[in-house]
Image (cartoon, rainbow, N blue to C red):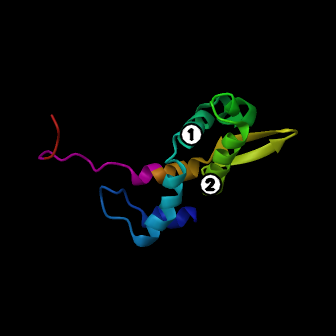
Amino acid sequence: MSNQSVTDCCAPLACEPLSDAGAEDLAPLFKAVADPVRLRLLSLIACHEGGESCVCDLTDAFDVTGPAVSYHLRILREAGLISSERRGTWVYYRVNPQVMARMSAVLVPAPATAAGAVT
């Protein structure tokens, strides 16, 4: 999935329907965050001071085993939502802002019109 192809093919859902190719490109991203543990992991990494988080910090935040956290991190990494870097015995994760921007751009609501505005 290229940055350019998703940007070109995917206008906000409220403006026009997704093309088949656009839906195929975006579905794995949304599927990756459609799990509560993965969504929370993504949030913890994104909000961590310095923009990156050590796996040691992430594991303690959940009531699941270390291998389960590693599995969820792998799913996020394979989807391109996060990247990782090994430093000695620890792995550090950071959010991929370009991928997050592509996902959020598709979810932008249509501007409210005077007739459709909620008061």
Residue 58 in the image: above or below residue 17:
above
Q: Residue furthest left?
A: 115
In the structure shown, which secondary structural element does the residue marked by tag 2 occupy?
loop
Q: Quadrant of residue 48?
A: top right
Q: Give how far across and how far down residue 28 sits, in percent.
A: 53, 59
The numbered mark at residue 37 is 1
- Rendered image: mark on residue 80: 2
Q: Which residues are magenta?
A: 104-115
Q: Which mark is residue 117?
A: none
Residue at the (60%, 56%) spot, across then down: 79
Task: Determine the residue positioned at 49% across, 60% down.
Answer: 26
Residue at 61%, 48% (x, y): give it.
96
Residue 49 is inside the magenta segment: no
Figure label count: 2
Q: Main secondary structure of the magenta part?
A: loop
As shown in the figure, which amino acid type bears the numbered disc 1? Val
Judged from this view, the residue extending furthest toward the bottom is 20
How far apart marks 2 and 1 lie (CA) works out to 17 Å
Q: Earlier in the sequence, mark 2 or mark 1?
A: 1
Q: Quadrant of the N terminus?
A: bottom right
Crowd band around label 1 with a 10 angstrom C-alpha radius: few (<14), some (14–19), many (20+): some
* Amino acid bearing label 2: Gly
Is residue 108 on the magenta stretch? yes
